[in-house]
Image (spheres, rainbow, N blue to C red):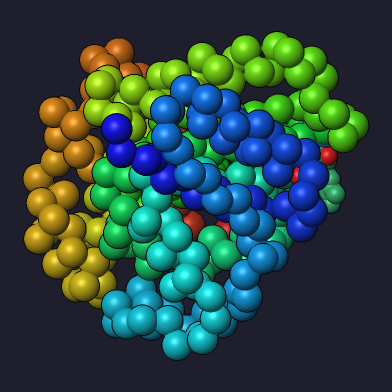
Amino acid sequence: MSTLKVFALVGSPRRGNTWRLVELFCTILTRFAGSLDYIIKRVDDFHIDFCDGCQRCIIEASKCHIEDDLDLVKGYIEKSDLFILASPVYLHNVSAQLKKFLDRTASWCHRPPFLGKYSVVVATTAGSGLLEVLKFLRGIVTSWGMICLAEIGAIMPTDEFLDKEKVETMLENVAIRIIRIVRREAKPRITAEDIVNFKHWKFKILEASQYLPHDYEYWRTNKLLDREYYYVEDIVEIPHEEIEKAKRIESQYDEYWKIIGKIYESGGIYINM
Ligand SMILES: Cc1cc2nc3c(=O)[nH]c(=O)nc-3n(C[C@H](O)[C@H](O)[C@H](O)COP(=O)(O)O)c2cc1C
């Protein structure tokens, strides 16, 4: 049996709760995988600079001109069979450290380089913002082309798990399923939110094809424009109920698009008072 490689990127500045949860999950994965190597790094373990907003990676599809460790991190992700993206909840959002890194990957959302790579997202909180951050992280890895296998969140008001035994039992169940999927013994299921995310990107790519021809070409050559999702059904399970739920979620956007239409009509300015 081949050795599975896991790479985890943690957004916390410290080796704290998020690190502990990721490490516990990795040790549990190791127990069930037979043979597994894992590497856990904080964003702060790398030299990552802020995006300077030039947008050349998006518009010209050129390599980022900033010389730092972005390619090194990308290399770690490329070599892994499973990528874990983790953040503490800071003010109902991801940490600034992680956001700094994620901004540098905007072109990965436009032209997803990790089609079909398995991923898990992880977050910890003292109580609030957990689901929002997990949803955001899932949206990011999905936009990079990955298959998100699980969202794992923990409420940790102190530097301890609330009930470590229960946490371990839950993680064991997740680990067993994930190992089966990564070993291709089971198919991953995608969610309605994943489908909606894909549709939004496809819409943007088609709408902006004149201004972002590199994106359009990438989606065309990777046959993404003909699809209802990043992958065809022999790779992922696309449950009927999730397709129906996706339609309902999309219809909730009608109101949102109406407001955006009005903003266009008002010369692009929005005021709420
Ligand atoms: C700057 C900062 C902002 C935080 N914001 C929130 C928050 O909005 N909601 C919350 O429930 N916990 C918040 N917390 C608590 C952390 O989410 C929680 O302690 C988390 O487990 C810390 O993970 P870490 O040890 O990996 O950094 C915040 C903590 C810090 C340091």
Image quarter of residue 167: top right
Judge left or right: residue 81 versus residue 259. Answer: left
- For residue 18, above or below residue 234: below
Q: Residue at x 16, y 49 (%)?
A: 224
Image quarter of residue 236: top left
Coordinates of residue 205 in the picture (x, y in percent): 25, 59
Q: Nearer the viewer, residue 89 or 234?
A: 234
Q: How many marks?
A: 0
Q: Residue at x 31, y 53 (%)?
A: 114
Where is ligand 1, by quadrant?
Answer: top right
Quadrant in the picture for the N terminus: top left
Q: Is residue 243 visible?
A: no
Q: Nearer the viewer, residue 175 or 264?
A: 175
Coordinates of residue 266 in the picture (x, y in percent): 48, 62
Q: Nearer the viewer, residue 267 or 3?
A: 3
Judge left or right: residue 103 versus residue 87. Answer: left
Q: Is residue 54 visible?
A: yes
Q: Nearer the viewer, residue 199 or 31?
A: 31
Q: Residue at x 44, y 18 (%)?
A: 176
Coordinates of residue 178 in the picture (x, y in percent): 41, 26
Judge left or right: residue 79 versus residue 29. Answer: left
The extreme right residue here reads: 158
- For residue 141, above or below residue 100: above
